[in-house]
Image (spheres, rainbow, N blue to C red):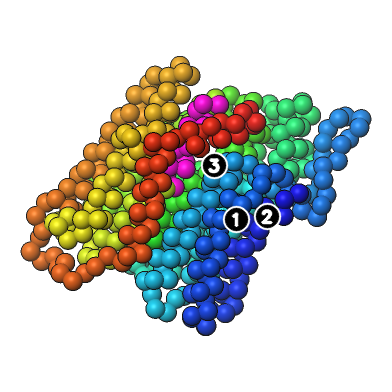
Amino acid sequence: MNELIPLMVIVPLMAALLISAFSKFNTVTKIFAFVVAICLPLIPLLSNYGLHYFGGYEPILDTLSGVMYHPAITYSFTFLQQIFIGAIGLLTFLVVFIYLTKYRKVSGPYLFLLFLGTAAVTAMILTDDIFHMFVFFEILALAQVGIVAASSIDYSYEMALKYMVLGSIGSPMMLLGIGFLLALTGSVNVTDIAAAVHNGFVDATSPVFLLSLALIFFGWLYASGLPPFHTIKSGIYSKAEPHGAALLQSFTVISMISIVLIMFRIYASLPIFEVLIVFFSILAMILGVSLALTQTDFRRMIGFLAVGELGFIGLGIGLGTNFSITAGLFQALNEIIITALLFIGFGAIVNATNEVDTRKLGGLLAYHPKVAIMLLIGGLAMAGVPPLSGFQSKLMLVQASLSCGFPELSILAIMVSIATFVVFVKTYYTMFLKPKPNDLELEGKEVPKAMIFAMGILLIIVILLGIFPDVVTNGISNFVGGIL
């Protein structure tokens, strides 16, 4: 067993608890939070691939049936977990760094929520236990609500409450679905459940099994922010601090892929499963970009575009081939990086202007050229313009759709990408290129260097993944081959 694997969850979780307990010591809190944040992206890089069985209880072989039974919670650490945990660790570091440099007196509870959310999504993508995943899914939901409520933005409490109320519907339905799986298979270990289904111990056409799919799928829609939850998901992004929104969207992406990969292992034999994923993904793509076109608040605009990008992820996974799932997971990694870049960049504009209405902005290129250039590249990456990383993943998705015999999905993906480009160019022109309004005061308002640094790091990753996509796609493809 690899003892570093559980540390990926334990370190941010313990950091959250210690920061909350000793938050009155401001300097100590800032130093401790900074040191822990630096460690988060390093631990997955230093850890070897493998499995960790909690309590040391390794799988038991039933000699009569030849079936392996997993009595303990199991964490699985592969290349896929490495890149996503590394990405969330890096982003947490950048967000914490921005927060620590922005405020002289930091909020212990706010840092607690940032680290708690990071620990939760890390556990979700590591675990091979569906109930364990649900527990951390609930913890993540509470952290997300807290991050939104803790912001200084108007009506943030209202938006957090709405998200929590919807969660009180989605979460119990997912738990009920998990309960049905436990009743059918006698286990909450995903490997055991999948083996029971594939070996015929569970009737995949039984009403109870199909009902479990419906319930867990509904919970997944809530976690992912796919329709009908797209409006509330974009809303919580717009009511969080910009750096907090950057982290929130990464929480959404990782929880989305964590849950859908579990469902894929259990329900892939059902044709309706992939149809449902593709259907709701198409809805997300169309509604996301359509609603983004109507926004004048650039935070809400980025929020809806982020929802549309989730549709691309679902499209790749829903097609169900090795190449398409690889493309979808690569798109997920790109969305984490690109959307974080945009949220932080637009947050820099808020910091400099105290304004979020694009109609009241203009002429920012002359005052903040670094932010303007990095935002331009980030927006082009989201739209899928070569040679940036977003182009590579969307090209793979178009090719996957064609190879699966769905040229109409390829056309849709291209059209949504073009619409995304139009949305961003329109917003960019309004904010940076049109003449500055007379009543907009910009003199002496600087963008924090921490934000410039964070954007620079993310931009380098976007460019490198665009030039060298095989660095991650080969490893992702090997992972996907192991679950198909």
Tell me the element at label 2: helix
Find the magenta span and give its range.
322-336
194 up-or-down from 334: above or below: above
Which residue: 43% across, 28% down?
396
Q: Is residue 155 left or right of residue 252?
A: left
Which residue: 75% across, 32% down?
195
Reply yes or no: does residue 324 show up in magenta: yes
Q: Mark 1 sits on what residue?
A: 43
User: Dividing the picture into quarters, in which one does residue 440 lie?
Assistant: bottom left
User: Dividing the picture into quarters, in which one does residue 142 lie?
Assistant: bottom right
Whether residues under marks 3 and 2 lie with C-beta atoms below 8 angstroms apart, the answer is no
Q: Mark 3 sits on what residue?
A: 257
Between the C-alphas of marks 3 and 1, the distance is 21 Å
Q: Could you classify mark 1 by the number of other residues whose Cα lies within 10 Å: few (under 14), some (14-19), or many (20 or more)? A: some
Q: Furthest residue to the top?
A: 405
Which residue: 59% across, 38% down?
261
What amino acid type should be assigned to the residue bearing mark 2?
Answer: Leu
Whether residues under marks 2 and 1 lie with C-beta atoms below 8 angstroms apart, the answer is yes
What amino acid type should be assigned to the residue bearing mark 3?
Answer: Ile
Which residue: 56% across, 56% down?
42
Q: Mark 2 sits on what residue?
A: 4
